[in-house]
Image: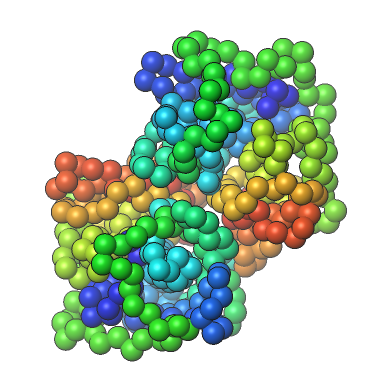
């Protein structure tokens, strides 16, 4: 999160707005934010929004759906998050994406499972006062100096197969693979599969991702399979992420478009 | 609730006539079922292709039932459902006619089930892939009765011509004056055994609203020039009263693909938001 220099602002109603600078290290070849980075933005903001929405309980991301639009070369991506339902056991949050404060860039829908607040989080203090701020203090001195996926040390062994070792930089607070890094695996597994079909490159534009289990054992491996064949410069894929024990920890479907 | 109680009570199942069989001896913790959708002329388009409206219905039906089997002695309600159609099966011969739905429960947790449904045509060509999440609950009158493993049920179809009608007539849809707005009046045949609107009915209404918006016509009838290729629907509350109103708005486009947001509300229940969906509507050449 620190490397993406995310910023957030929460208003008095609890709704959240956030921003992510788009750089050559985080963008697609056509200058838009890569889906992997958008997933980190909406996951981080969604988690923040869920704290007040689920209070006094807690919420974990259960699934995430992202649709990206061709917003053109972008310098700053903005996300506005709103709670659409707070039930006893689920929380649904919608995010609207805006490029450079003016162009629609897509949307996201997230479902959270609402659970009793875990013991170790009962007394946690979170600064929810209004105001724009960095989401991670390390962002002031940490900067990406290579592609985001290279920084994550995410590897593609063959078209459709992406993997990552489990190490602190890619883990969440319970030592499992961070939810947004699942999305990075899904993004690159899908895009690499599509690149084997399309000569000029490919970009993942849509993703529906369901979290099934914590990925606590590395390496985590994403395997993308085409659903039918490509048509009109588009490919649909199904992607499964397995942990080092072979357990299925997340599943997704994606759409990838040729550049 | 994805309903599979007494066949006599489920009008949507009687309309779709999908046969479902459980694979194995019925003791698997994560059940596996296979559905066979026959595809009657009134449910298919002129090319013999099933629209995403009814595709969502049959996926919700088999996915809900299979998720429910994983949850016994409790049962489930569908909370969200994601579908993607294969891009090479939107036109031409691929993906037409009878369909097979291969359904696996991927995870059965304490409070939720995630299930995958893969849809192929009779040649084995991919038509669509889907996953859905269901919340586990304890129904007041117990779960539907099943003999395990589940065997196909021969459903008695009521002697009523509405069960042979086109989709928009069976689901009681009507267009408003504005493209992108569709009304559904609740009839008994559209309810599930728990008395609430069948989840597939919401999907039919929102699919029609999204297509109507993109083609720019106030219509609930088939639109040969546009098809929903991708759907992410979140079921937020049950439909009980009606009329149900699906309202589509454009979120942007990428060439022939329109990103459409759809809200489905129960106007008779204080306009409560029942479902929220993002869909991609593809304009065909």
Q: How many marks on residues?
A: 0
Q: Nearer the viewer, residue A131 or B76?
A: B76
Give me the residue at 36% from left, 42% from top. A88
Instruction: Provide residue A166's location: percent of width, then percent of height.
Output: 79, 42
Q: Is residue A154 visible?
A: no
Indicate whether A129 appears above or below A76: above
Indicate whether A105 appears above or below B84: above
Residue, far right: A157
Indicate whether B158 appears above or below B4: below
Which quadrant holds residue A150?
top right
Q: Is residue B240 left or right of residue A195?
A: left
Q: Nearer the viewer, residue A21 or A199?
A: A21
Instruction: Provide residue B254's location: percent of width, then percent of height.
Output: 53, 44
Instruction: Provide residue B91's location: percent of width, then percent of height.
Output: 51, 69
Give me the residue at 23% from left, 43% from top. B272
Give me the residue at 77% from left, 19% from top. A143
Residue, far front: A119
Give me the residue at 48% from left, 28% from top. A51
Instruction: Provide residue A188's location: percent of width, then percent of height.
Output: 73, 47
Q: Is residue A155 left or right of residue A118?
A: right
């Amino acid at each position: 999160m620190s490397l993406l220099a995310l910023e957030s602002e929460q208003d008095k109603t609890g709704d959240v707005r956030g921003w992510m600078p788009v750089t050559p290290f985080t963008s697609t070849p056509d200058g838009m934010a890569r889906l992997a980075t958008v997933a980190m933005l909406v996951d981080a903001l969604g988690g923040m929004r869920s704290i007040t929405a689920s209070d006094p309980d807690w919420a974990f991301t259960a699934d995430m759906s992202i649709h990206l639009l061709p917003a053109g070369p972008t310098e700053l991506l903005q996300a506005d998050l709103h709670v659409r339902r707070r039930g006893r056991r689920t929380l649904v949050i919608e995010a609207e994406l805006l490029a450079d404060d003016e162009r629609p860039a897509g949307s996201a829908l997230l479902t959270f499972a609402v659970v009793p607040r875990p013991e170790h989080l009962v007394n946690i203090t979170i600064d929810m006062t209004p105001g724009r701020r960095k989401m991670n203090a390390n962002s002031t001195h940490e900067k990406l100096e290579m592609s985001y996926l290279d920084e994550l040390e995410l590897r593609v062994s063959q078209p459709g197969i992406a993997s990552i070792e489990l190490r602190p930089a890619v883990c969440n607070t319970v030592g499992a693979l961070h939810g947004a890094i699942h999305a990075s695996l899904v993004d690159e597994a899908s895009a690499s599969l599509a690149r084997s079909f399309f000569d000029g490159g490919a970009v993942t534009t849509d993703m529906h991702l369901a979290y099934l289990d914590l990925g606590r054992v590395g390496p985590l491996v994403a395997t993308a399979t085409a659903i039918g064949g490509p048509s009109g410069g588009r490919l649909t894929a199904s992607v499964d992420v397995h942990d080092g024990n072979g357990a299925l920890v997340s599943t997704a479907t994606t759409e990838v478009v040729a550049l | 609730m994805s309903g599979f109680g007494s066949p006599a009570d489920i009008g949507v199942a009687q309309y779709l006539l999908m046969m479902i069989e459980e694979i194995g001896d019925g003791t698997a913790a994560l059940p596996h079922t296979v559905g066979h959708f026959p595809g009657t002329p009134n449910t298919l388009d002129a090319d013999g292709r099933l629209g995403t409206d009814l595709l969502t219905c049959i996926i919700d039906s088999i996915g809900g039932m299979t998720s429910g089997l994983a949850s016994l002695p409790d049962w489930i309600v569908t909370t969200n459902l994601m579908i993607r159609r294969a891009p090479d099966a939107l036109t031409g011969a691929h993906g037409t006619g009878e369909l097979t739905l291969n359904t696996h429960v991927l995870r059965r947790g304490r409070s939720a089930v995630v299930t995958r449904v893969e849809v192929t045509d009779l040649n084995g060509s991919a038509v669509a892939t889907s996953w859905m999440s269901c919340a586990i609950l304890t129904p007041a009158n117990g779960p539907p009765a099943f003999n395990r493993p589940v065997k196909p049920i021969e459903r008695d179809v009521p002697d009523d011509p509405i069960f042979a009608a086109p989709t928009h007539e069976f689901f009681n849809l009507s267009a408003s004056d504005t493209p992108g707005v569709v009304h559904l009046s609740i009839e008994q045949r559209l309810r599930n055994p728990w008395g609430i609107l069948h989840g597939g009915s919401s999907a039919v209404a929102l699919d029609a609203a999204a297509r109507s918006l993109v083609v720019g016509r106030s219509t609930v009838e088939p639109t040969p020039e546009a098809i929903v290729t991708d759907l992410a629907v979140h079921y937020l509350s049950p439909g009980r009263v009606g009329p149900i109103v699906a309202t589509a708005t454009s979120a942007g486009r990428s060439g022939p693909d329109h990103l459409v947001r759809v809200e489905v509300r129960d106007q008779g229940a204080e306009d409560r938001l029942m479902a929220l969906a993002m869909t991609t509507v593809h304009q065909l050449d």
